[in-house]
Amino acid sequence: MDITEEIKNLKKAKNAVIIAHNYQLPEVQDIADFTGDSLELSRKAMELEGFDVIVFCGVRFMAETAKILSPGRKVLLPEADAGCPMADMADPEGLLKMKEMHPGAWVVSYVNTSAAVKALSDVCCTSANADAVVRNAPRDKVIFLPDRNLCWYVRQKVKGKEIVCWDGYCIVHRRFKPGDVAMARKLYPSGEVIVHPECDPEVQSLADGVYSTSGMLRRVRESLSGVFIVGTEEGLIHRMKIENPGKTFYSLGPARTCSNMKKTTLSSVKNALVQDRYPVELDPDVIRGARRALERMIEYI
Ligand code: 13P
Ligand code: SF4
């Protein structure tokens, strides 16, 4: 039997739902019940009813977020070591020190953080709502972690608050360079250059627009342009092509891939369902603290 058929049958037998981030391999996106960005998938995990198991095709912090929002369900991460190097750049000890250095500051954590860091934060955000979350923070001073580039983006958008940036970054998005934008302008003069806020400030400043992955999908749908140069993990282009058959998409510079996002394959999804692996387990206190920060984000926006 074809592996996609096997997965469909297993899904039914286990009463499972498969959700996949926009950066997953095309064939994994194609078998998912839902695809989306971090914010959409967090919401989906909370709203879903009638399923016993969530198979989360993405990286660990995303599966943890699903578990925090749906603690009563089994959440499976098909590849145990699919992590996010940027999330690993922020640790609870370092955050406690930073809080001591900036007493009274409101801690805003990007969802790309461990559950333990979320539990020490006042509120979470995603790249789709980071500026709104910081704007709505009830304090004048904010600690923003872990992405220094998203933090720079928020500083451009939100005036009147002191924002202290953590020094983390995404190893994939930092590979986009200003020269890639110059080259794209030369090759596709009528193309629209859209980039993710995890890119370096120089790249963001040269682009036509800066968007989260869901923001990029919306922009591509609504823009009158027919050609787009996309500065984010190349997996997103799969969905752009499906949703916009009349438009043309190029990666900004050579296609950049997140090796962690690409660890999940159809075989790992099948094995996850057959062997119930790898369940996300979190300490109940961590779940409680992290849930408060995530729920606040959802209330804020
Ligand atoms: P989104 O929040 O846009 O889905 O991005 C998540 C991510 O990991 C970007 O690198
Ligand atoms: Fe983490 Fe960057 Fe991969 Fe997103 S693209 S999961 S931020 S390493």
Image (cartoon, helix red, strand yellow):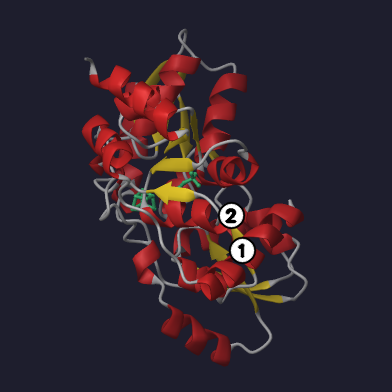
Q: Is residue 59 above or below residue 25?
A: below
Q: Amino acid at mark 2?
A: Leu
Q: Where is residue 64 shown, x and y percent of the image? A: 46, 57
Horizontal placement of 21 versus 69: left or right?
left
Residue 178 as seen in the image, left or right of residue 291: left
**In the current view of this chain or complex, which residue is farthest to the front?**
13
Q: Going by the image, does 195 lie left or right of 255?
A: right
The foreground one among 51 and 91 is: 51
Identify which residue is drawn at 31% across, 52% down.
Answer: 278
Instruction: Indicate the secondary structure of the residue bearing disc 2.
Output: helix
Q: Is residue 162 left or right of residue 186?
A: right
Q: Position of residue 36 (x, y in %)?
A: 51, 35
Choose the circle earlier in sequence order: 2 or 1: 2
Q: Residues within 10 Å of mark 1 (few under 14, many from 20)?
A: many
Name the residue beneath numbered marker 1: 291
Residue pictured at 33% horizontal, 37% vertical: 273
Q: Secondary structure at mark 1?
A: helix
Three-letter residue code for mark 1: Arg
The spot of residue 186 in percent (x, y) is 34, 26
**Residue 226, position in %: x, y?**
49, 14
Cα distance, mark 2 to mark 1? 6 Å
Residues at discs 2 and 1 in contact (Cβ within 8 Å) = yes
The residue that label 2 is drawn on is 69
Q: Nearer the viewer, residue 74 or 62?
A: 74
Asked if 213 appears above or below 174 in the picture, the reply is above
Residue 26 appears anywhere in the view: no
Q: Residue at x 36, y 22 (%)?
A: 9
Residue 24 visible: yes
